[in-house]
Amino acid sequence: MLQYLGYENSVITLILSTLFLALWNMWPTKKWDPRGQFCYVTGGSSGLGLAVAIALTKRGAHVTIVARNEERLAKALAELEKTRQSSNQILRSYSFSLTDADASHAALETAAKDHGNRYPDAVFMCAGAARPGFFVEEDAKSMQKGMDNTYWVQAYTALAYTKQLVRSQTSGKLVFTCSILGYMSLIGYSTYSPGKHALRGLAESLRSELILYNSSVHIMFSGNIDSPGYVEENRTKPKITLEIESTDKPTAPDVLAKELIYGVQRGDFHIAPDMLSNIIRSSTTGATPHHNVLLDVLYALIGWIGLPLWRRGVDSTVLKHRKEHKDYLAARGFFKSTD
């Protein structure tokens, strides 16, 4: 009898603890305010990066955008100027190739000079690109480029920024932008998804390490974004992948930018901008901090039922393309190649 009572007490304790954590997560806390903060945005010339830069400018932040294309940067900076909230805001743009470690460091150094050699209060890493395709058609060069455009393009900036934070003994925010393909993957993304999984691993490590320096790390996992990059990646995206994604409507960059900033303000580590990404997030949490325990349990339950069904449907779609794919490879001379 006593052992059963002990078991019941343990269950009650667990339930009460869960309810307490859920209520604690819902309790309002002081939000981060970008007004007057120096915010650095990579990939800021278009798409999500530009939308984030505009949203931060509207909130009164000093904003520096960095990207490669100088013409697009000039147009993007003009857009920021239209939304400036005061004449005191410092708005700048610089052209650097962020897939290079030295250039990533130089970009931060250049931006800091506009602020008396003070480094950013928050770094939003939105740079990146995808070039979907079949793995059997890749080579060493394209695989390396895939990692450059998905992992190193953000990791180099994070490394340069973190070193300067620690040396200057100041705190800051590192904000990565990932993808739901950093939680899972599917056909066509063999040079994209690995880098996004690596980015999650880096963010998980840095979240723990930067506690030492009173700095925070955030990472957003979004679906397709309605941007020039999305149009470009669809040009090489396999027909199978396009069919699988046919019911997915890409999200407007300004909507995701709003969710990203709100997530940072809430202090979320993993930022999931919609229900689908929340379901996948909660189903692959591991040791990652929860948002709201009760909601996360609900999302995980939906995922436990729904995701295997989704995966079965994906596999069925892929199988239907088996003969067509073989013909495609034959037409391209794949079976005669010695590579």
Image: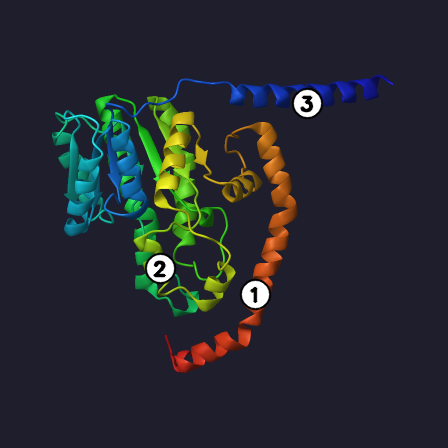
Mark 2, other Cα within 10 Å: few <14 / some 14–19 / many ≥20? some
The kind of residue tagged 1 is Thr
The kind of residue tagged 3 is Ile
Answer whether residue 130 is visible to the viewer in this image: no
Q: Which mark is residue 233?
A: 2
Q: Quarter holding the C terminus?
A: bottom left
Q: Which of pointers 2 and 3 lies earlier in the amino acid sequence?
A: 3
| Residue appearing at x 50%, y 57% in the figure | 186
Residue pointed to by mark 3? 15
Residue pointed to by mark 1? 317
207 lies above or below 240: above
Answer whether residue 8 is visible to the viewer in this image: yes
Q: Which mark is residue 20?
A: none
Mark 1, other Cα within 10 Å: few <14 / some 14–19 / many ≥20? some
Location of residue 32 in the rendering, given as x and y in whole percent from the top left corner: 35, 23
Location of residue 293 in the rendering, given as x and y in whole percent from the top left corner: 58, 28
